[in-house]
Image (cartoon, grey):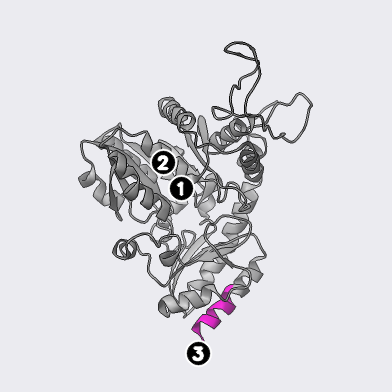
Amino acid sequence: MGLIASDKFATKAIHAGSHVDVHGSVIEPISLSTTFKQSAPAQPIGTYEYSRSQNPNRENLENAIAALENGKYGLAFSSGSATTAIILQSLPQNSHAISIGDVYGGTHRYFTKVANAHGVETTFTNDLIKDLPNLVKENTKLVWIESPTNPTLKVTDIEAVSKSIKSLNKDILLVVDNTFLSPYLSNPLNFGADIVVHSATKYINGHSDVVLGVLATNNQEIYERLQFLQNAVGAIPSPFDSWLTHRGLKTLHLRVRQASLTATKIAEFLSTNPNVKAVNYPGLPTHENYDIVKKQHREALGGGMISFRINGGSEAAAKFSSSTRLFTLAESLGGIESLLEVPAVMTHGGIPKESREASGVYDDLIRLSVGIEDAGDLLDDIKQALEVAAAKN
């Protein structure tokens, strides 16, 4: 018995990508073999030949990702950055791409320092809806969105962008990075995205012990092109990493929901605190695109990510970040444990200051990744760190 169309997210998270094992094991075994026996030349006994091309653990993970993103096809890669690289590598030479300006630092780095080496030029904009018609060129092949953006949590109307793109040139691909929300909170393919990508290192795995990237699509031609590059380039995850990520995926709905509920409480507190200059959180009704949040996010939940500007500039941001008890000062996000960072000198430190600040990434901006610890304990930690940061020496 397998999944049926009426099965809800939690059921799909547990059962999508289920394995078939001759021993009847309930939990999927880890398949470490790099090569698979053939009965005659070019006649594999099963469906696998060589683990770079496909592996049981990776295939099960890919099927699960496709199911949770309401897609037909899924692919897994050795990192989120590798996923980005493969998509951009699939574009013809001398292509043009358009990206939202407030984007993950690693994505910005790839667009500006790697993709340009094989002739992909990228234009960045902080107002995609307004600027898109004027930015599309004859050689534009791709539009890249993060929603919410990293780290200022701007939300983009995916459906509106998709309609605008297709009215200008139906062959332009719309790629949405859904890392900050996970498939539990939003499914960009439902709103017209051609490809949805994740750094599965974050919420999908959820335990800060795997580096991995995934994508999903409903387009067979796109899937076959990217699958070819996955094998040809070889940027694949190991069987063990695939297994760990698939295991983490099974509790995604529980983790992300709890993180979202706690993050809402923290964001509400921050928005009334006199030591805080501004709060970015999609789950607040005061968010500038809350109407889009209600359309694109499950139950209008804002996710587990918050960013805020603290009074006192970079010195106060550093003091706050070094004063928390439960929030660990570290890069990355989406794990069971709570993390915080200062994007201007950490994840987005490689972006020129002028470009960074044009997207709202100031020296006093702090990013929180809210975990699944007790909400009251996390809130107390934020309160005391703000008091320390505000105290005069």
Task: Residue at 56%, 46% (x, y): give it.
Answer: 184
Q: Amino acid at mark 1?
A: Gln
Separation (CA) of disc 2 from disc 1: 27 Å
Instruction: Assess whether mark 1 and mark 2 are in contact (beta carbons under 8 angstroms).
Output: no
Residues at circles 2 and 3 in contact by the CB criterion of under 8 Å: no
The secondary element bearing badge 1 is classed as helix
Q: Which of the two discs, 3 and 1, labels the residue nearer the N terminus?
A: 1
Query: Magenta region: which residues?
Result: 382-393
Q: Which is more foreground, mark 2 or mark 3?
A: 2
Residue type at mark 2 is Ala
Residue 122 as seen in the image, left or right of residue 152: left
Magenta segment, prevailing SS (helix, strand or loop): helix
Q: Residue at x 66, y 63 (%)?
A: 373
C-alpha distance separating marks 3 and 1:
45 Å
Q: Position of residue 226 (x, y in %)?
A: 44, 31
Q: Which mark is residue 393?
A: 3
